[in-house]
Amino acid sequence: MNKQVTIKDIIEKCNGKLIQGNENIPFENLCKDTRTLNPGEIYLGIQGEKLNGSTLYEQALEKGAKGCILQNVCVSEQVLKKYPNSTIVLVEDTVKTLQKMATYKRNINNVKVVAITGSVGKTSTKDMIYSVLSQKYKVLKTEGNYNNEIGMPLTILKLTNEEIMVLEMGMNSFGEISLLTKIAKPDVAVITNIGTAHIGNLGSRENILKAKMEILEGLNKEGTVVINYDNDLLKNWYKKEKQNYNIITYGIQKGSIVIGTNIKYNESGSTCKVVLNERSYDIHIPVGGEHFVSNGLCAVSVAKVFNIPMESIVRGIENFELTKKRMEIKTSKKGAMIINDCYNANYDSMKAALDYLGKLSNKRKIAVLGDMLELGEYSQKLHRDVGKVVAINNIDILICVGKQARNIAQKAQEEGITNIFICDSNEEAIDILQKTIQKEDAILLKASNGLKFTQICEAIC
């Protein structure tokens, strides 16, 4: 059992002030949203742009919170008397307290950490690594999109009896991964690729590489870096830095330490041979798309660090479960195949999803594509680049939603795609689909999360 952090630690290490309650209760089962709070959890009142969540402490107590960590509020004596068994602590900054306690918990426990970053594929790679490592160890992983300065510390503080933590690290700008890696102190740092996500904030792919490589600032001195050798910028970085780090490369290009060959794609997934230590192993990946082959090779690389037998690695990859809304295969009310990949989008993930759609044997291929956000001055070009990918994959029907997605439609039309619909809303797209869908269609739904394409998926499934 791992050592736990308590309220007393907050008082001693963060200058917390105990208003009432028990300082010996564990600082765990945390919730930052009163709407989803369950009885027995500790409420963390976070200062937002418009609202100080700490002001909602009475709502949290009404819903059964056993404690509250708050900032910038005056707790009513009336409320204290009403909930005499609750533990209330005031701190200067709840987010910094959360981060400091996560750092402390990481430091006092002899647990291994695998940290994952990259422009695309972080979550699916995390899911696959988790499945493989779980064949031998007890593993804690990031849930959902808890990959930022609040979500990752919340994950660490969930640690109980696990031996390995698999933590996803996201970022929008410089300094964010630096903060996360210094909290997590990874033993293995995984970089899946360097693409164009957040290029509007960072200005170039080279700057994205620099921001992602902040992950190395917290890496254990004896730690391992795992990188995608098929990615041009990572490959160049490896050539410059291979003497300075313990690096495992993976990919389908010659020169990778973990190499995938004989790749075959079908509707139920992919198969490939993995060459490792001059031996070849057959692997089945239960999700379609070339990028999932890459994720599988990454999982093999990480498993190699933890001495997991190849037979267990193969089983872990075959049985992994993908986080919802990421290449999730569903069936429409009319029997068509729906590829629900609407959690997020950038050029690299759009291309990967369209390449997968293009390889399917369904009679008609329909792509419903929405805006890719946070691309800044690169937005028009990258949306037009997606339109070219649509044409290369011979998509039969293209439905575009959003202002920027019009650039996808325009370029696809220039490249010869004729069956194109441009929509101002999800409702328009739903109406077109309901009139268009046939049983043997394959339909891709993909856009940035802000477009709320889940509405489309729910309407047609």
Image: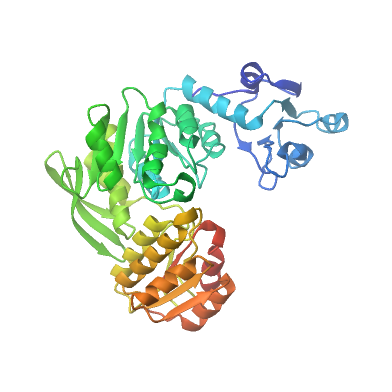
Q: How is the image coloured?
A: rainbow
Residue extending furthest right?
A: 78
How many marks overall?
Answer: 0
Residue extending furthest left?
A: 278
Residue 103 relative to residue 132: left or right = right
Residue 344 in sight in this render = no
Q: Residue 31 appears at what percent x and percent y?
A: 63, 39
Q: Residue 297 appears at what percent x and percent y?
A: 26, 46
Residue extending furthest top?
A: 12
The residue depicted at 44 percent of the width and 73 percent of the height is 409
The quadrant in which residue 415 appears is bottom left
Residue extending furthest front?
A: 377
The residue depicted at 47 percent of the width and 55 percent of the height is 377
Residue 74 in sight in this render = yes
Residue 15 vs 140, above or below: the answer is: above
Out of 162 and 279, give the one closest to the viewer.
279
The residue depicted at 49 percent of the width and 28 percent of the height is 183
Residue 420 vs 219, above or below: the answer is: below
Q: Residue 362 appears at what percent x and percent y?
A: 33, 75
The residue depicted at 60 percent of the width and 35 percent of the height is 29
Q: Residue 151 appears at what percent x and percent y?
A: 54, 39
